[in-house]
Amino acid sequence: MGILRLGYAEINVTDMEEAKSHYERTLGMKHVEDVNGAAYYKGWDEWDHHSLVLHEGGVGVNKFGYKVQRSEDLDYFEKKAQAFGATVERMSAGDTHEVKDGIRITSPSEHVFELYSEMTEVGSDVGFINPEVFPRDLVGVGVPGVDHALISCEDPDLVNKFFTDVFDFYPTEQVVTSLDDDASIIGSWLAATMKVHDIAIIKGPQGKLHHFAFQLVDWSQVGRAGQLFSMDDVSIDVGPTQHGITRGTTIYFFDPSGNRNEVFAGGYHAYPDRPCVKWTPDQLGKGIFYITRELNERFTTVFT
Ligand SMILES: [Fe+2]
């Protein structure tokens, strides 16, 4: 089976108390614990210990965690990363809080990905025996969990190859310089399993975060999130709107430190044999923001 999903993102924030208020009160993530100055959070429908870690100091992403199905998968991915020429190191249990053995891989985009098969399970907020459909004490948006991330890199063709060759992801949609066979990739949306994307890469600075996203169910929840963002004076980048790419509905917004977040709902089921959708540069505005068909400058220039 290989990689199951984005398990966690560890990000930096400039002010811990402001960040906690944003992720806890506005987005409604569950605060799991504070350890050594870091704050651990999860969504209500997630069962592993955490899906978001906040570190005080700076902005941007320190690392991502990808959960794999079996411990043997770690050997498989270690060999593949080595064959690709990526930097790989073994992680011992506890190197990352509440995570068992794993491997730490640095991608050609200079992002760190930790692959692991086990994290301490703390259970979802509705449980797995005769569960309610959502917890009735949700706070704010009440996000169920994290969904995906978009990262930037100088060489999207190389990083796309890294994700397909090493992690066995497959591209669902791409923005390409042309429809010719020798075209270059400007952006690529890649799936690990059947979600429309688990990672997206776009041409830009090395090692940077464009955004990470929280999953919602439908457009009405995206609209409600927007109402809550107004109540809490959250800085909005774009939305509510819909993507042409992935067909997801969305709002982009910033946490108090300036890290871009997204609430994302919808999208279609991905299959490895579904032809990869291609977008040409002249239609990039429509691909990213299907309704307005325009990119704002901030969207293409602000990375953390
Ligand atoms: Fe996204």
Image: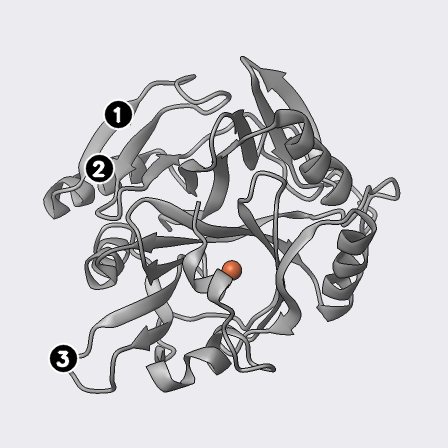
Q: Are marks 2 and 1 in contact (CB under 8 Å)?
A: yes
For the residue marked with disc 1, what is the amino acid?
Arg
Establish whether ligand 1 lies closer than 8 Å to the Cβ of label 1.
Answer: no
The tag earlier along the polypeptide, 3 or 2, is: 2
Q: Position of residue 275 (x, y in %)?
A: 35, 80
Identify the element where label 1 is drawn.
strand
For the residue marked with disc 2, what is the amino acid?
Glu
Residue 194 in sight from this viewpoint = no
Query: Which quarter of the rendered picture does the C terminus lie within?
Result: top left
- Residue beneath label 1, please? 90
| Front label number (3 vs 1) | 3
Vertical placement of residue 95 versus 105, above or below: above
Vertical placement of residue 188 versus 49, above or below: below
Identify the element where label 2 is drawn.
helix
Q: Position of residue 128 (x, y in %)?
A: 72, 41
Disc 3 to disc 2, how far (Cα)? 31 Å
For the residue marked with disc 3, what is the amino acid?
Asp
Q: Residue furthest top?
A: 36
Residue shown at the point (72%, 63%) measured from the top left: 222
Q: Which mark is residue 199?
A: none
Vertical placement of residue 172 versus 151, above or below: below
Residue shown at the point (53%, 44%) measured from the top left: 259
Identify the element where label 3 is drawn.
loop
- Residue beneath label 2, please? 78
